Amino acid sequence: MLRTKLPWIVLAFATLTASPRLFADDWQPITQEDLQMKADPAHPSDAIILYHEETADDLTHHHYVYMRVKVLTEKGKDQANVRIPFNATEFGIDDIKARTISPDGTITPFTGKAFNSTFLKAHGVKVLAKTFTLPNVQVGSIIEWKFTEFWDEFIIAPHWVIQEDLPQQYAKFTFIPYVKVGHYIENGENEILNRVYYSPINLPEHTTIKTTNDNRLELELRDIPAFQEEDFSPPSAVMKWRVNFYYGTDKMGKPQEFWKTRGQYWTKSVDRFATHSSAVTTAVNQTISPSDTAEQKARKIYAFVQKIKNLNYTHDEDPTLSKEKRTLDRVLSKQEGYSNEIAKLFLVMARTAGLSAYLMRVADRDEVFFRPGIPDPGQLTSEIVIVAIDGKETYLDPGTPLCPYGLLAWQHNSSQGMRQTADGGTALAPTPVANYKDAASKRVGRLTLNEDGSAKGTVGIAWAGIEALGHRLNGLKTDDAGRKKDLEDELKRLLPTGSVVKLDSAKGWDDANAELTANFSVEIPAYASSTGKRLLVPENLFETRGRQPFAHGDRKHPVYFAYPYIDIDETHITFPATFHLETITDTQPAQTAYSIYKVAHSTTGNTVNISRDFAMGGMAFQQKDYDELRKFYAAVATGDSESLVLTAAK
């Protein structure tokens, strides 16, 4: 999404030419057909969107939204709870109007108040949601609402998200761009943005976006299917039908030329912000020693910038953000900054120390997959640094707190972006491929089984690499009590239903280079099930609630894991002396070119020891690969469902 700040003279002109509000108080007419609509067993859905309209107006800096929904089932009544997310830092929401139409046509206006609730806080931006509940909603009701989103001082090329979680009878999208006769945008890089480009993604074949005589871009669609979520799929933003718009120049018709030119502007902007200064020199001299090797210098500087307070991961707001020019000297003096500022600080300090260092701007693949054929720089949001030492390049992520030296946050590996090169230019390039060894978990459970099938014991878990980083970043969002609850809840989800879990200790929260460890006491009221004189005991403590994630024979979306990983489990079960162990069934291993699963057993007196190794080295699988992946997980599910058989002594 391109955001370009407009000069004051342009803002004044836009204000003079601003159009009136689009919707005012008008509602679409209600038809008897809509009032009488019933659930269709042939096409089951809890609700259906009858009418969906959005207009993004860059002339007036407004975005208008209108939704009408028919409630078809009891579950569909949940649609009465409306949530409107918005970026509270740069946007506002007003003119919220809503009403309920009963099946007999009676209209009940919404007269309550929409409340702000925290929706998300990430990337240094506080995101809120306006929430409200429509009154008197029943099966057969029609509910509708509309609102206006507004902003100031910049233009936005919108992203139309066509698909919703409900099917839609009709949807209309309109974009009123700033580019028209007498209007143009200068983006601060001596470029005149005089054209609007768009990229349709996943739309049906022959879908047409029309340009009207007054320069509006419009799309009308009917009978839009609901977007169906599937476990382990690419981000929904990537898979849904959508259209992305962006402003540009005539050069943007040729992506290769665009990225070359964009790289030149980007490097200049980096140089303007990341300027060498005496403060940077002082910080470098205080951090490294003249006798340090290049590797030692890089590690010491990395450790220094990692200690800087990262405003992307804190609840604190920066009250001087809009009042004070942001520079590296400011980041150093206040010892706080945003992720990309901290990355640039590392870049400049590394160069000041005599290292060859290059900035790289990458796509966060938890949100978007980089498409080099689309000349939209908004795809690239995060910055990492590449340091060349002894002819080898090391990719570093100084802007992600608690990220170990030499490791990238999972959103940044196996991605793509634009990097600086040794010759002073830029190039599109990939980041290192994710490796399953960089995301490891080890879980050890020691249980003592009672004759009634209940069990008590301890569980120890150690996370390393990406797994540890994920827990640490989540830990930054809460306090000690919150971290304790999160860890206990995580283990409860692995253990049998009804398990009692108590965290005894957790270490390594603040040490990026160490394992993060947690130790628990556990009680499981019904771990084993009784069948006469026998007890059936699940072999693997941590997979008793596991399921086959790919049980369905067909698949609509590709399979996508966030990152490759490895789990190493040990379960030690000590059973009562009044029972004896029958023969243990060997668990069949499973293996593909990208995954492995194996289980081994041993006994020590009346203790059974089970070790389980599981590694998934792949990340993305197309539908053609689904059958093999499904068979592998079916074998894992079969192995994990094995039980020990204990027989009571006569």
Image: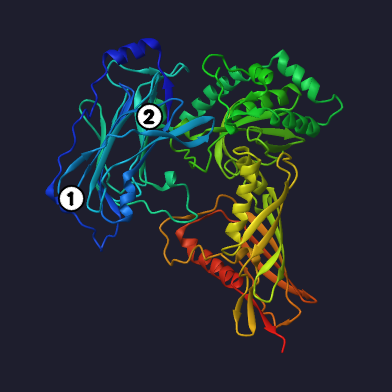
Q: Residue at x 30, y 48 (%)?
A: 205
Measuring from the top left, give residue 271's x and y in whole percent.
61, 19
Q: Distance of mark 1 from mark 2, alpha carbons?
A: 39 Å
Write the residue at 63% across / 35% down. Answer: 400
In this image, 236 relative to 136: left or right?
A: right
Residue at mark 2 = 157
Q: Residues within 10 Å of mark 2 (few under 14, many from 20)?
A: many
Q: Is residue 221 visible?
A: no
Compared with residue 564, is residue 98 higher up or lower down, i.e. above or below? above
- For residue 492, above or below residue 98: below
The amino acid pointed to by label 2 is Ala
Q: Residue 317, how many percent across, how many down?
A: 55, 25
What's the amino acid at mark 1?
Pro
**Where does label 1 land, which residue?**
103
Badge nearest the viewer, 1 or 2: 1
Q: Quadrant of the C terminus?
A: bottom right
